[in-house]
Amino acid sequence: MKKWVSLLLVVVMLLSMVACGKKTKKAASVGLDKLKSEYGFQWTDPTKPILNEKGAQELSFNMYSSKNASAKDYNDMKIMQDLAASTNVTVNWENVSESIYSTQKNLIFGNKDNRPDGIYHAGMGAGEIIKYAKRNVLVPISDYLEYMPNFSKILEERPDIKAQLINVEDGKIYSLPRIEEMGLLQNPNILFLNKNWAKEAIDAGAVTGLSADDLKDGVTIKADQMEAMLTYFKDNDMNGDGKTTDERPLSFVYNNWQGNQCDLYGMFGLNDNLEHRIIVDGKVTYTVQDDRFKEATNFIANWVSKGLISEASFDQSQDMFLANGKGLEKYGAFYWWESETVVSNPENYIVCAPIVGPNGDQTVCISNNPEVGVGELIFFSDTPNIEVLLAYFDRYYDPIISAQINYGPIGIVYEEELDANGMLVQKPLPEGLTADELRLQNAPLGIIYLSDYAWNNVVNMEPRAKLRLERLTAYVTPYMPTNVKPCPNLQFTMSELNTLANYETALNDYIRTNLFKWITDGGVSDSAWSAFQSELNGKCKIGELAKVYQDAYDRYLGN
């Protein structure tokens, strides 16, 4: 009985939390004619306010959003205050932590009498959007595109983005996306090598076919040469602390979104990723059904059993990996986006080309990390004067505004004056703050549009992002096959979503469990591999799942 009472109290408390903030009922919509005539509503000229002073005083909107713990309240952020001043649109923000939002999300949707006007950082999946769209809970944004010139232009110029947003059940769009295209997420790994340790191994005669002069950015190393080098790192006191037990020959963060193990499968010609799902010649392909995957797994497991790959790679968090790289040098080689983040002396590390495998293969991971984030912002169907609110958020897709939403405002993060090329340039970092700290404090993130045009004409990339892109362009992307593509954001029918819900989690768990066991326990036998393939095609329904993705991908290409 006490448990039921306690549970009831928790539910009541959560409902009261959802109801807190704005207690008054939503005002009625005033009608488009009155918006124009009395409140000065206009949306075509981005240099002018959306509302006049009367509109600013009499109309307001309530938005709900999770935020990073380091971020200021959105009401106090300079970029939000600047937007209020330039648009005359009053938006009142209610911020909660990400954990509270995940708890309150369903309660908000169910509390029809006291909902906000919209949810920012909504994190809405395709299934949720279909469900609430059918119940007429969400605003069909595509019905109001005339009030959104920036977003409409994106949809017109980028049918690939439009295809990732359309609800296939009715052909409408119910959420606004986040679009940040840098060309980084597709390749989450760069291989770095300690050049001083490598030179010592070469000078000692442990590695053949390489000279000290070869040790510069872009060096190509064969698998047997890398194995000899890592063995030398393991067996010798490379950092000079009197021990041979603290060196980590090759390190990464297993199954992390970046700096993971997937590039090692490139030694066997596989463009693997964390989902083990990729598009090859237009066909959805699971890498775990390729016999080369077995060969690669056994090869990697052999390196693990020999101590050439650090055991910590399989149980350390990203933060632990980064912390262990600081101070006394421990890493002989590692996968990450930049050495500057990982080690204290990045000048001691060079960038390697992908390792050449024993059969001569040389390629890289192609991840499915999307540069288009769907489901980022939704609006409730009972929101009054929705045209005004959509026109306001449409301003976020202006590249000057997008840069400030994503990194922080002019005057704090960006210089007041443009550079010689007429582009936004970042101010020097305040003493005692990292780039991440400054950004998280002052930028709400969320819906933006930063594409090639923005990076070439409007805003300079962060220095570290620019460095990542330069390295990827020089040493990683040349090794991507032209016939292999990442699997994009796809929209599914309700029937397809049911198939995914029924089988995909079990499939992923089955693959994950077996792969971890094989890599850390000596590899996979022929009989175990055969049983694995039978299970994939039987109980795990990998064929049915591939068909769901293929049908969705074909629709994506057809839009």
Image: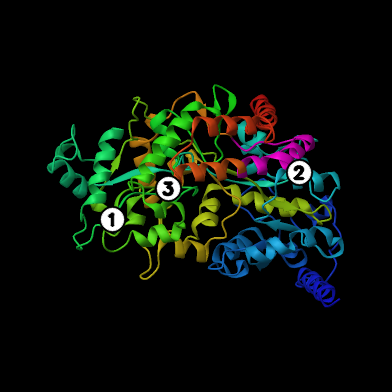
- What amino acid is at disc 1? Glu
Examine the rendered structure and indicate whether residue 534 appears above or below residue 255.
Answer: above
Q: Residue at x 33, y 45 (%)?
A: 306
Q: Position of residue 453 (x, y in %)?
A: 49, 39
Q: Earlier in the sequence, mark 1 or mark 3?
A: 1
Give the spatial CA distance, label 1 vs label 3: 19 Å
What amino acid does circle 2 point to? Tyr
Q: Residue at x 83, y 78 (%)?
A: 2
Residue 412 percent across, percent down from the top left: 45, 65
Residue underneath mark 2: 144
Query: Front-most of 141 and 313?
Result: 313
Q: Tell us which disc is closer to us: 2 or 1.
A: 1
Q: Nearer the viewer, mark 1 or mark 3?
A: 1
- Left or right of residue 500, residue 412 in this image: left
Query: What range of the chain is rendered magenta?
Result: 488-509
Position of 426 relative to 100 (above/below) = above
Q: Measure the alpha-carbon separation of dots 3 and 2.
A: 42 Å
The tag earlier along the polypeptide, 3 or 2, is: 2
In the depicted view, which residue is nearer to us: 261 or 130? 261
Which numbered marker is on residue 389?
A: none
The one nearer the camera, 452 or 208, is 208
Residue labelled with disc 1: 247
User: Under tag 1, what secondary structure?
Assistant: loop
Assess whether mark 3 and mark 1 are in contact (beta carbons under 8 angstroms).
no
Q: State the SS at label 2.
A: helix
What secondary structure is the magenta-colored segment mainly? helix
Which residue is at a point 40% across and 39% down the rendered structure image? 300
Query: Which type of secondary structure does the marked residue at label 3 adopt?
Result: loop
User: Residue 86, image x and y in percent?
Assistant: 61, 59
